């Protein structure tokens, strides 16, 4: 499938409404691969997006969250909720478990024979991967380590998306683990290439064509960019988020569990600073606990409390129409 793309540039799926159909269409119709993010959406909303996306686009992807099996430490979660409650009052949500409507969303991928499916937070088993491949779906498993890459290969994935610690949003690791001694993306790619012989898509901190050229020269088969597209006209990011990314108000990003209980990289605002040291490993329970806080922050346009997911390269964001940015990336990378 990757060799059917005119350019090996993929728009990262970005849950939370950041990568709507308009963005995915702009990228797919420019000769890259546009992605729909199924995460946190209802099955009905995803079906609507797939139907819209199918019109006029042969190639696009749908990204799914693999249900979590990590145990939540209830004691730590409740201790953290007590701390939060003291600060924000009654605004906490219920600590729920959800499989993000896994079966319903998978059924849609099968029903509409979606051309590309990528998986995050785990590796689907061989049987499921084969079922998808039989109907013509190209299966990508997102991985963060050599070990996870090997597992994805053993289960029959068509390709891996190798995500570096530089990436914006959640780390896709199969388990809710800490990251110790992270390797820069290029070094991680070199290590993975020693043992993996299926196509490798790389993601994390990629903002310009020069980086794309370097990663392709290192043997990546394609690149996946998220943060670079957040301020495009077609993105679903709200104004406060766009402003926070571009204003210089936030000087750095940080990997934090403060919002969801799973490591994710975002701008280091007050919420991240205050709660990262004490946030428990409790995904997706903590996602639901902080949901009302995050919603209120959006309504109040309070960037200090919103989850402002961003990769380390956010200062290089170019707020352009997606097609224009895509064309610039192609030219800078010498892909034309
Ligand atoms: C706002 C945001 C939301 C994201 N949501 C998802 C998602 O739903 N599924 C997924 O696999 N990756 C998600 N990611 C991670 C991207 O797939 C990708 O790994 C990351 O954007 C690459 O790093 P970059 O942002 O520095 O380009 C998200 C990233 C961001 C910034």
Image (cartoon, rainbow, N blue to C red):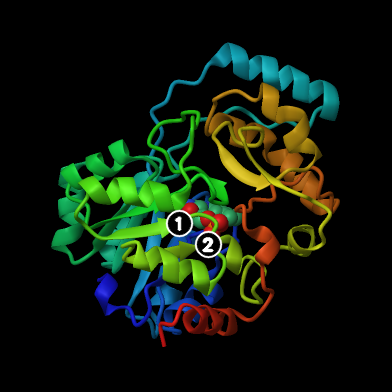
User: Which residue is labeled 2 in the image?
Assistant: 206
**In the image, residue 311 above or below residue 238:** above
The disc at residue 17 is none
Residue 179 in the image: state x and y as whole percent: 49, 32
Residue at 79% from the left image edge and 23% from the top image edge: 85
Closest to the observer, 106 or 319 = 319
- Residue 201 visible within the image: yes
Q: Are marks 2 and 1 in contact (CB under 8 Å)?
A: yes
Closest to the observer, 335 or 3 = 335
Quick one: quadrant of the C terminus? bottom left
- Residue 48 visible within the image: no
Residue 249 in the image: state x and y as whole percent: 84, 54
For label 1, the SS is: strand
Residue 2 in the image: state x and y as whole percent: 28, 71
Residue at 52% from the left image edge and 49% from the top image edge: 40
The disc at residue 203 is 1
Residue at 60% from the left image edge and 36% from the top image edge: 260
**In the image, residue 159 above or below residue 292:** below
Residue 148 in the image: state x and y as whole percent: 31, 39
Q: Few, some or many C-alpha atoms within 10 Å of disc 1 (few <14, some 14-19, many ≥20)?
A: many
Mark 1 CB in 8 Å range of ligand 1? yes
Mark 2 CB in 8 Å range of ligand 1? yes
């Amino acid at each position: 499938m990757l060799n059917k793309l005119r350019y090996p540039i993929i728009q990262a799926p970005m849950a939370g409404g950041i990568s709507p159909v308009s963005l995915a269409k702009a990228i797919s119709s420019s000769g890259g691969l546009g992605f729909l993010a199924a995460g946190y959406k209802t099955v009905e909303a995803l079906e609507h997006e797939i139907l819209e996306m199918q019109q006029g686009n042969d190639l696009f992807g749908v990204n799914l969250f693999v249900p979590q099996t990590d145990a939540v430490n209830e004691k730590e979660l409740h201790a953290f909720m007590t701390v939060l409650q003291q600060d924000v009052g009654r605004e906490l949500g219920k600590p729920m478990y959800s499989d993000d409507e896994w079966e319903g969303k998978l059924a849609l991928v099968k029903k509409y024979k979606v051309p590309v499916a990528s998986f995050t937070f785990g590796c689907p088993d061989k049987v499921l991967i084969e079922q998808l491949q039989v109907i013509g779906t190209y299966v990508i498993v997102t991985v963060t380590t050599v070990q996870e890459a090997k597992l994805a290969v053993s289960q029959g994935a068509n390709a891996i998306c190798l995500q570096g610690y530089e990436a914006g949003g959640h780390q896709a690791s199969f388990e809710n683990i800490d990251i110790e001694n992270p390797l820069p993306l290029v070094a991680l790619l070199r290590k993975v290439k020693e043992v993996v012989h299926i196509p490798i898509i790389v993601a994390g901190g990629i903002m310009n064509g020069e980086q794309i050229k370097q990663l392709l020269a290192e043997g990546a088969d394609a690149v996946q960019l998220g943060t670079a597209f957040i301020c495009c006209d077609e993105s679903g990011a709200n104004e406060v988020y766009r402003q926070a990314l571009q204003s210089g108000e936030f000087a750095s990003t940080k990997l934090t569990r403060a919002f969801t209980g799973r490591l994710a990289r975002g701008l280091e605002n007050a919420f991240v600073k205050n709660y990262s040291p004490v946030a428990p490993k409790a995904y997706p329970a903590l996602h639901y606990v902080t949901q009302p806080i995050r919603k209120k922050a959006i309504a109040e346009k309070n960037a200090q409390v919103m989850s402002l997911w961003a990769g380390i390269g956010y200062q290089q964001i170019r707020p352009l129409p997606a097609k224009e940015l895509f064309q610039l990336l192609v030219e800078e990378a010498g892909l034309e």
